[in-house]
Amino acid sequence: MAESAEQLRCTRDSHALERLQDDSVPTETSVEQKKVESCVGAIFNMFKKQPNQPLVLERDIHAHYLRKGLQHLSDAYECLDASRPWLCYWIVHSLSLLSEPIPETVASNVCQFLAHCQDKNGGFAGAPGQEPHLAPTYAAVNALCSIGTEEAFEVINREKLQEFLYSLKQPDGSFNMHLGGEVDVRSAYCAASVASLTNISTPDLFDGTAEWIARCQNWEGGIGGVPGMEAHGGYTFCGLAALVILNRVQLLDLKSMLRWVSFRQTRYEGGFQGRCNKLVDGCYSFWQAALMPLIHRSLHAEGDPALSLTNWMFDQQALQEYILLCCQCPTGGLLDKPGKSRDFYHTCYCLSGLSIAQHFGGGDLLHEVIVGRQSNRLNPTHPVYNIGPDRVARAIMHFRQKEVPEMAKSKKD
């Protein structure tokens, strides 16, 4: 499907009712929302004044930005010194989505660097010499599985990784993010993700985890960081994806969750917000939109007859319009919203959300919705792990040839 400016569906500027109505009672939130809508509306209107101008994903400049970042970062990135495996993952996955190969020498350098981030007692740290933490462990494993070479797989010390996960497991089923660290739904997802990809899961490792996650779903329908907290897009993704991995999705009220996430797609901008009454943000193009395939497939497994056979349950075209028009930096990289700076985090999750919006189904049931040029098409991403489905399959097949380690379990007992 290709669309020009004349065919563009973003006619929201001519429909005043689709803009925020504050009933003449402005608040700090409503003022900021109106600023965003005004900025986005100006971009939509400017584009519509260019007849026959197609929407274009500027692949080359994004790829250049990403390749450069994989080998050299400026001093401005010192603040992310504890997130270096994340930088590797964000960049490697983004290049994969764009069908941009990574030279073997560069891929090997990434593997060697991540090996230096691996702690001798298991897990990965945010940088060499730092303490191991579940977040960079997730990022490192995803980056290595996305590279998918024998060298990449061999970096992961599975036995020590399993010991590390056991050391973080709490009696109620939750996980600390690091030894003595905070507990929230992110840690449960990170643990389930790396354990399932590397074939180190045991029944007792995740005993009680699914039930703990289910208690984090609140009255809104989404999932909070811990039981009783406000529903949040990132936590909701982590909770649902973890339960998909653990095969316990039935513990959730999926219809309630579907209603909550459907209302997080902003009517005017077309992108997603993370929470009720918050501003649109490009990163939620993945965190929220990826919930839709997971919910859809779970409801399909339950035999829901009302499900579409061609589309996810959100406006896939509107999300693509928002990303392509409002989130591309002219010098490469993608961003939160107009007026914000580019970064590798938003580049990864805007592209991942764009991929989710383009691809529907799997197996024999495939349908694509490509807004703009056909060259805008990205490779698909797995909605549970957010790496390529082929990379997920390759990793799982590789590690299934190895036995599940029992050392950590026996030490714990």
Image: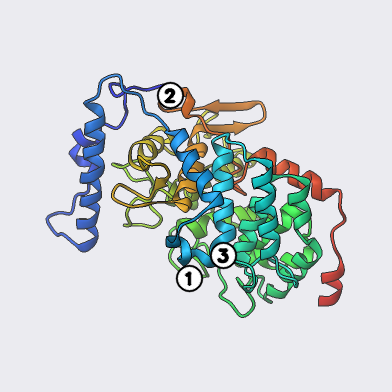
Give the residue type at disc 2.
Arg
Residue at (72, 65) in percent of width and height: 206
Q: Is residue 186 left or right of residue 171?
A: left
Which percent across, then down, holds residue 395? 74, 46
Q: Nearer the viewer, mark 1 or mark 3?
A: 3
Residue 221 seen anywhere in this rendered image of the structure: no
Give the residue type at disc 3.
Val
Which percent across, then down, holds residue 295? 55, 45
Assign the N terminus to one quadrant of the image.
Answer: top left
Q: In the figure, residue 19 lies in which quadrant? A: top left
The residue singled out by tag 2 in the image is 373
Q: In the figure, residue 99 lies in which quadrant? A: top right
Which percent across, then down, holds residue 174? 63, 70
Vertical side of 376 occupied by 169: above or below: below
The residue singled out by tag 1 in the image is 228
Q: Nearer the viewer, mark 2 or mark 3?
A: 2
Kindly state the secondary structure of the residue where label 2 is placed: loop
Quick one: label 3, few (<14), some, or many (20+) residues within 10 Å?
many
Do callouts 1 and 3 mark residues in contact (Cβ within 8 Å)?
A: no
Q: Which mark is residue 185?
A: 3
Quick one: label 1, few (<14), some, or many (20+) residues within 10 Å?
few
Q: Is residue 11 left or right of residue 165?
A: left
Please tell me which residue lies in front, 94 or 1. 94
Which percent across, then down, holds residue 376? 46, 29
Label 1, label 2: how far apart the Cα atoms are: 45 Å
How many dots with numbers?
3
Q: Earlier in the sequence, mark 1 or mark 3?
A: 3
Residue at (55, 29) in percent of width and height: 309
